[in-house]
Image: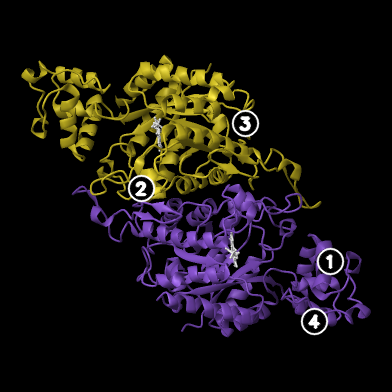
Chain colours: A yellow, B purple
Amino acid sequence: MTRQMHLTVQLISGYGLEPAAWRWPGIDPASFINADVFVKAAQTAERGRFDALFLADTPVLSTDVATAPPQQALEPIVTLTAVARETERIGLVATSSTTLNHPFTVARQFRALDLVSQGRAGWNAVTTSHPGALLNYGTGVPSRGERYERAHEFIAAVMALWGSWEDDALIMDKEAGRFADASRVTPVGLAGRHVASRGPLGLPPSEQGQPVVFQAGGGLNGLRLAGRFANAVYNNPFDIPSGVEHAAAVAQAASTYGRSPDHMTVFNGIITSVASTRKEALERREQLDALGDLETKVAYLGQQIGVPLSIEDIDKPVHQSLLENARANPADPRSPLALELAGEGLTVRRILAHGTMNYHPVALGTPDEVADILQRWHEAGVGKGFNINPDATDGLEHFVDEVIPILQERGLFRREYAGTTLRDHLGIPRQNGLPAGYGQHVGAAS
Amino acid sequence: MTRQMHLTVQLISGYGLEPAAWRWPGIDPASFINADVFVKAAQTAERGRFDALFLADTPVLSTDVATAPPQQALEPIVTLTAVARETERIGLVATSSTTLNHPFTVARQFRALDLVSQGRAGWNAVTTSHPGALLNYGTGVPSRGERYERAHEFIAAVMALWGSWEDDALIMDKEAGRFADASRVTPVGLAGRHVASRGPLGLPPSEQGQPVVFQAGGGLNGLRLAGRFANAVYNNPFDIPSGVEHAAAVAQAASTYGRSPDHMTVFNGIITSVASTRKEALERREQLDALGDLETKVAYLGQQIGVPLSIEDIDKPVHQSLLENARANPADPRSPLALELAGEGLTVRRILAHGTMNYHPVALGTPDEVADILQRWHEAGVGKGFNINPDATDGLEHFVDEVIPILQERGLFRREYAGTTLRDHLGIPRQNGLPAGYGQHVGAAS
Ligand SMILES: Cc1cc2nc3c(=O)[nH]c(=O)nc-3n(C[C@H](O)[C@H](O)[C@H](O)COP(=O)(O)O)c2cc1C
Ligand SMILES: Cc1cc2nc3c(=O)[nH]c(=O)nc-3n(C[C@H](O)[C@H](O)[C@H](O)COP(=O)(O)O)c2cc1C
């Protein structure tokens, strides 16, 4: 097996991961509506030979816009089409919901993106549990069981529609007047409990056949979906052991459906804060924190370690008398690290700078230190991939210019793209239509 | 009132209007999947100061792919996003169905296109009657009444979602940490019989507020929809009187809803075949016909004039003995022209070249002759606009280089864009949200 890792990059709505990144110097405060920001970032990531740019997406305004931009980019298909036209190799992965859309639209839009990008599209299929998003679509709130049953039908329908236009159907012989082999362009006639579509699609396969399917979240339900259909999975482990466990479960799920675990990549979410020294990286994070809602953060740190803390304590270590009664909150896996740092006598501000409250682990420090962290996770077997979340978007350039060369030096990351499509980058075979053997393992579905 | 006309251009799937145009010299046979074709055409049309590029769309494969490409482009949002990034002024109008989509998706994707193009987007809202398209979406076949009832709710929901982010809500004060005025970003809480959406949208208005709404087809139902919501209408009259009649009905429909008829443009579909001489234009059309299904065309011409005709008759005039019993088919308004040309002794091939079987009137001849035809229609009062359908895509260049300068010379068409947005081009005011006075004329809706 190759020693190399796979990398996608995520910029949320264009500013980077930290909620206050929109206020960071050099960041365009209008990034969430500026496709140029995504184009430029994708070009930077392509220079760094990233596998793909990734757009998560939940169609709901979930932030308080008084102080923070929306959490989703412009619109995934529009944004990635703009990026496709101004990049050459990097993959383009957009999230689209199996609960809120129709398979014909998803099949058509992602195939169009795949054609425009010459085989670089990926579809992150999620079931969307956010009640606000469901209200935007007036669908009521389906049960988890309903959502995942629909997701199985939905992805099967999309893949069947993709396969409805077979490889080599297109002839385009102007002389003879033969446009296509009509026997290779056929209806799929799918009708399930939740979705139905006749087909065929009006678009032929791309250079990679069909877009790569990604899957994210959903516990056991998500694993079944991934095992049956996906070639890549997003995961958000807080530590290495849970990352390793999930990667093993993903491999197992693929095997259950008769699919090769080698054709699965698990992308683990990591936040990066890179600087010339570890101290500068921490200071960068402190400055980013200072632009956001520090009060809430301090109070929540108090809950993590079980002591009362308020904003007045920000530049002091946690008092010794409090530390004696402190203990890690068992409901939050990040709490032991917070407690440990408090015990070392760091100020509250500095503890927060370590990312004890972030949604992903934070890889911070010098380029070498950040590379070390990725290498440690990678070699432990977390599934070969990382979804890099720069703290603020300018952090992507630091990562590409300083961390990537180290990973390449160590033989952990490609120096050049081996091929032109996203499937090439991920080392997975061409596919157009449902997975080989689909339906033979249906018993495993529920 | 201005003497000037408005022009959009339509290329179907990139080849131009004639079904066999994909075989025409110089045309890329893969145009239907090649966004470059649309980008280049849009740049040409922009050089000619066209109001907009228009993509009709019915999500179904309705042609026989053995001999002809699909009738719709790649995918409207993807195609127009590519075009938006590589043009500066021309409007971008995509068709999207109120029967097959969800308002939140339409509101979001068209707003994203409007932002990416800096205020140049338009939405042609159609109800989609094609049974194949309905089957692709597994929706069954709603009655016409249901389709139009849903369309009213749907367009209102889309406009309300657009208006859910008010003008000037965006602040983006990095220093003070104020991103937006949250009191101007509010839910719409819409729930009708067919669609529901809570909102708000996560995207602010563009330079023109919201995309321009176009409407197409549907008789009286369509007129009501247009009168209530649209600023532009597509119409396919076969002759000037029916064009004038429809334009008057559109103006009347606007007035019924308390909206200004001056803010309505009706785009009449016209096919253009331009050459140095009238004879060359006819020969060009004969050559295009010869690449297609001539047999069917000849037989149908026979039906139009009530005589038996077959492919062997192609290079002969209709025989005198047949002409004596010929009469125009009352079911097809193009039949009198066919009969007249037959009476003049033209060969069958030459009769067909006049476009007696085309879905739109054909303006053919020298640049001056084509300009004359447009002027005649325009001055008769068909609604100020034309949707130009070049016979094959290279015809767009002839039109821009040769016909446009004549129209400009005659004061019938702009020499420069007066503004930057599609609303500027059409001479209609900024709008963000439902039309002023919406709801006061509800009685007129049904
Ligand atoms: C790494 C990761 C990324 C996710 N990305 C998205 C996303 O972009 N959009 C979305 O609606 N949900 C996203 N989800 C949510 C999942 O699809 C899922 O709904 C969630 O984990 C709740 O689980 P449930 O579906 O079992 O209720 C993501 C989950 C994970 C773990
Ligand atoms: C000029 C014109 C353009 C149209 N463009 C489209 C289109 O792009 N897609 C579509 O589905 N229907 C299109 N239609 C069809 C109409 O929306 C409508 O469905 C059709 O006229 C049938 O009428 P009905 O809706 O009353 O059944 C168009 C109609 C006209 C007259």
Q: Quadrant of ligand 1?
A: top left
Say which chain tag 2 marks: A
Q: Is mark 1 on a helix, strand or loop?
A: helix
Question: Amino acid type of disc 1?
Answer: Ala
Q: Nearer the viewer, mark 1 or mark 3?
A: 1
Q: Nearer the viewer, mark 2 or mark 1?
A: 1
Tell me the CA gap for discs 2 and 4. Answer: 61 Å
Q: Residue B107 carries which label?
A: none
Is residue A249 visible in the rendered image? The answer is: yes
Looking at the image, which residue is at 9% across and 27% down?
A316
Q: Which of marks 2 and 4 is in front?
A: 4
Circle nearer the N terminus (4, 1): 1
B426 or B125, which lies in front?
A: B125
Q: What element carries label 4?
A: helix
Residue B389 pos. (x, y %): 64, 67
Residue A46 pos. (x, y %): 47, 36
Question: Amino acid type of disc 3?
Answer: Arg
Residue tagged 1:
B299
Circle nearer the N terminus (2, 3): 2
Q: What element carries label 3?
A: loop
Residue tagged 2:
A32
Left or right side of B308 for A40 = left
Callout 4 environment at 10 Å: few (<14), some (14 to 19), or many (20+)?
some
* A146 to B248, vertically: above or below: above
Left or right side of A273 for A122 = right
Say which chain tag 3 marks: A
Mark 2 vs mark 3: tell me if same chain: yes
Residue tagged 4:
B340
